[in-house]
Amino acid sequence: MWRVIAAVSMLLVGGFNAYFSQRNHRKQGKLCIAGAGPLAGAPHLIVRELEATDLRRGFLELLAELTTVGRIADLDFRKRLRQLRDLGLVKVVVIHDVNDDKVVGAGTLFVEPKFIHHCGSVGHIEDVVVSSSYRGQKLGSTLISTLMATAKSCGCYKVILDCHESNVPFYQKCAMEVKGTQMAAYFNN
Ligand SMILES: CC(C)(COP(=O)(O)OP(=O)(O)OC[C@H]1O[C@@H](n2cnc3c(N)ncnc32)[C@H](O)[C@@H]1OP(=O)(O)O)[C@@H](O)C(=O)NCCC(=O)NCCS
């Protein structure tokens, strides 16, 4: 009962970030991603949250392997990162190769608070990409398991994502299943 009252007060007073931080990372005493740290067997590959300095580590070039990124000035990148942090509902996970000082993998979790399912939350996985020269080394599945574990630790009752047909086998290997049909409307602005 007290845990529920504490959770609700934190949501009302400090927003989701405080709730997130307190509930999931009580032990560490700070907000972090479930399963962050060096990879077993490849300690030069570090799983962690996106940092402002990742701009010079090729974060945008990595995203460009997924889709159109456009020109993003340093200032705009920092501003967007600050917005995401303030929002407290989005976690961008990266894999940093410290030997090359490059970001070689990335994926995003958006936690959507809902009314349905007893005010439950749904995790949306977005923008998953592994640098082409690092593919086939289980970095993609590491990203997905990290995002899934983070969603679970945040109390999400499910995680969902949209993907191209050709990536279905990859996500199935990450313990996900095909469910429903994607709909989209694009705006030209
Ligand atoms: C999809 C992607 C993230 C996979 O990353 P990866 O690091 O190569 O994947 P992993 O090494 O973790 O693969 C895990 C398993 O899935 C399999 N797999 C990966 N991609 C696959 C695909 N497109 N089709 C079938 N199987 C695939 C691997 O062979 C491996 O199988 P195994 O466990 O039997 O060995 C990567 O190919 C990528 O960045 N692609 C371009 C961007 C993209 O399409 N992102 C997804 C957006 S929805």
Image (spheres, grey):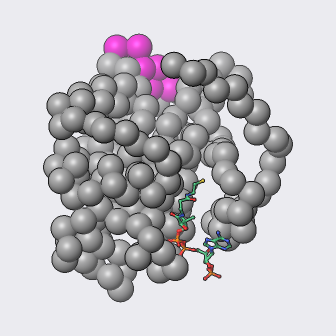
What segment carries the magenta color? 4-13
- Residue 57, percent across and down? 22, 58
Splitting the image into 4 quarters, where does residue 47 fall?
bottom left
Residue 148 in sight from this viewpoint: yes
Which residue corresponds to the image point at 41% horizontal and 76% vertical from the top-left?
133
Which residue corresponds to the image point at 32% horizontal and 49% vertical from the top-left?
60
Of residues 185 and 110, the one nearer the viewer is: 185
- In the image, is residue 153 above or below residue 20? below
Residue 39 as seen in the image, left or right of residue 141: left
State yes or no: residue 67 in magenta.
Answer: no
Which residue corresponds to the image point at 66% horizontal and 51% vertical from the top-left?
163
Looking at the rendered structure, the number of numbered marks drawn on it comes to 0
- Residue 50, percent across and down? 29, 49
Residue 22 in sight from this viewpoint: no
Of residues 54 and 110, the one nearer the viewer is: 54
Splitting the image into 4 quarters, where does residue 79 fall?
top left
- Residue 14, percent across and down? 32, 19
- In the image, is residue 74 above or below residue 113? below
- Residue 102, percent across and down? 24, 65
Of residues 131 and 19, the one nearer the viewer is: 131
Of residues 74 and 121, the one nearer the viewer is: 74
